[in-house]
Image (tube, helix red, strand yellow):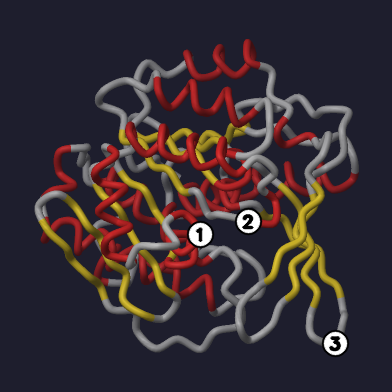
């Protein structure tokens, strides 16, 4: 498959195994983690995704590595670690998934700073850099990821997705401070309305999005389940409707949207300044919503592949 752009996308964050627990208590194991889902979406759509995350030498770690390679993701740190795979127990119910995490001393976050920096230096300028989810919480990834974001090249599109998991937050003031510092460099901050309720409980969603802009972000993308996806920039506000979808589950839907957005944006050779062009932003979000909808029609986080979307209006350019 020919990459969509000459410069790859770096995705930094956790990988894990989701233990999906159905209402009847049956359990199914699938690979997961927001950043992993983002990387798989980029690669499956034809982009070049380099995933920065520690993987375990245990059975689940092999499961994770095999699935990433099968999707076309490049493992930036391929050597497995002698630490267990991160686990998330995901209770599936009509109101949405509920998460319980096993994070302590697991492989995903145990990045070697030197090896990570050497891998990053292999590409002079990344087209985009994503950092998100539990990686913002767990050391040493949290501090290393922040340093990488803050030192990103000026032309690199930086995407931050807090994907807040309050049950996993141990130091709330530091977590909020880190999200703010990252948002100050971010070009795109993707948040759900639930994220905004947690980060800015006293503000309306619109005011909360503008508060993130005031910190320094260029664009705030807000998702709200089946309701329209909204993007707010200094130039105004746009929204994209989400067509009615027969939902199997919503695991990975937001991650698929982010991965598809970055693939579309960099595939059109767009940069940071283009985020203020409202028609282009709407087109990118509409294409990303289509990918997210397909993901919702499948059990677990299984974003579509290039051949599955190439007939859709937003992806015919492929």
In this rendering, is residue 72 above or below 193? above
Label 1 neighbourhood size at 10 Å, few (<14), some (14-19), many (20+)? some
The disc at residue 198 is: 1
Q: Quadrant of residue 201?
A: bottom left
Q: On the picture, is 250 further left or further right than 210?
A: right
Q: Position of residue 122 (x, y in %)?
A: 48, 15
Q: Earlier in the sequence, mark 3 or mark 1?
A: 3
Per the image, the residue denoted by label 2 is: 166
Residue lying at 52% horizontally and 43% vertically, measured from the top left: 132
Dot 1: element:
helix
Mark 3, residue position: 24
Mark 3 and mark 1 in contact? Answer it, CB < 8 Å. Answer: no
- In the picture, residue 3 is in which quadrant? top left
Q: Quadrant of the C terminus?
A: bottom left
Mark-to-mark CA distance, 1 and 2: 8 Å
In primary-sequence order, the first of circles 1 and 2 is: 2
Kindly report the distance in space between the C-alpha atoms of the residues bearing marks 3 and 1.
Answer: 30 Å
Q: Quadrant of residue 191?
A: bottom left
Which residue is more in the foreground, 14 or 75? 14
Q: Which is more toward the observer, 279 or 67?
A: 279
Residue, x 56% and y 35% (percent of image)?
A: 174
- Residue 98 in percent (x, y) is at 69, 70
Q: Position of residue 245 (x, y in %)?
A: 45, 86
Q: Residue placed at 65% from the left, 42% from the top?
A: 14
Q: Is the C-beta separation of discs 1 and 2 under 8 Å?
A: yes
Label 3, residues with CA under 10 Å away: few <14, some 14-19, many ≥20: few
């Amino acid at each position: 498959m020919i990459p969509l752009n000459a410069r790859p996308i770096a995705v930094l964050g956790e990988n894990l195994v989701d233990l999906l627990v159905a209402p009847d208590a049956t359990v199914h194991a699938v690979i997961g983690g927001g950043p992993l889902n983002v990387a798989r979406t980029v690669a499956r759509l034809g982009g070049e995704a380099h995933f920065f995350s520690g993987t375990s030498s245990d059975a689940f770690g092999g499961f994770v590595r095999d699935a990433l390679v099968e999707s076309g993701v490049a493992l930036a740190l391929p050597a497995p670690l002698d630490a267990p795979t991160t686990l998330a127990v995901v209770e599936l119910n009509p109101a949405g998934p509920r998460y319980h995490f096993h994070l302590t001393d697991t492989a995903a976050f145990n990045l070697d700073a030197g090896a990570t920096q050497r891998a990053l230096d292999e590409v002079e300028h990344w087209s985009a850099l994503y950092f998100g989810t539990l990686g913002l919480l767990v050391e040493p990834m949290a501090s290393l990821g922040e340093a990488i974001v803050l030192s990103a090249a000026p032309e690199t599109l930086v995407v931050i997705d807090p994907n807040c998991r309050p049950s996993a937050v141990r130091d709330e003031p530091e977590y909020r401070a880190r999200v703010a510092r990252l948002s100050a460099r971010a070009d795109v901050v993707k948040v759900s309305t639930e994220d905004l309720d947690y980060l800015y409980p006293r503000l309306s969603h619109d005011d909360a999005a503008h508060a993130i802009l005031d910190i320094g972000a260029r664009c705030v993308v807000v998702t709200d389940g089946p309701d329209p996806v909204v993007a707010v920039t200094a130039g105004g506000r746009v929204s994209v409707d989400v067509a009615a979808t027969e939902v199997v589950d919503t695991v990975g839907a937001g991650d698929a949207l982010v991965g598809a957005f970055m693939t579309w944006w960099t595939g059109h050779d767009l940069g940071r300044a283009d985020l203020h062009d409202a028609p282009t932003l709407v087109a990118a979000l509409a294409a990303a919503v289509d990918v997210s909808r397909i993901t919702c029609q499948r059990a677990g986080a299984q974003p579509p592949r290039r051949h599955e979307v190439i007939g859709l209006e937003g992806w015919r350019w492929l």
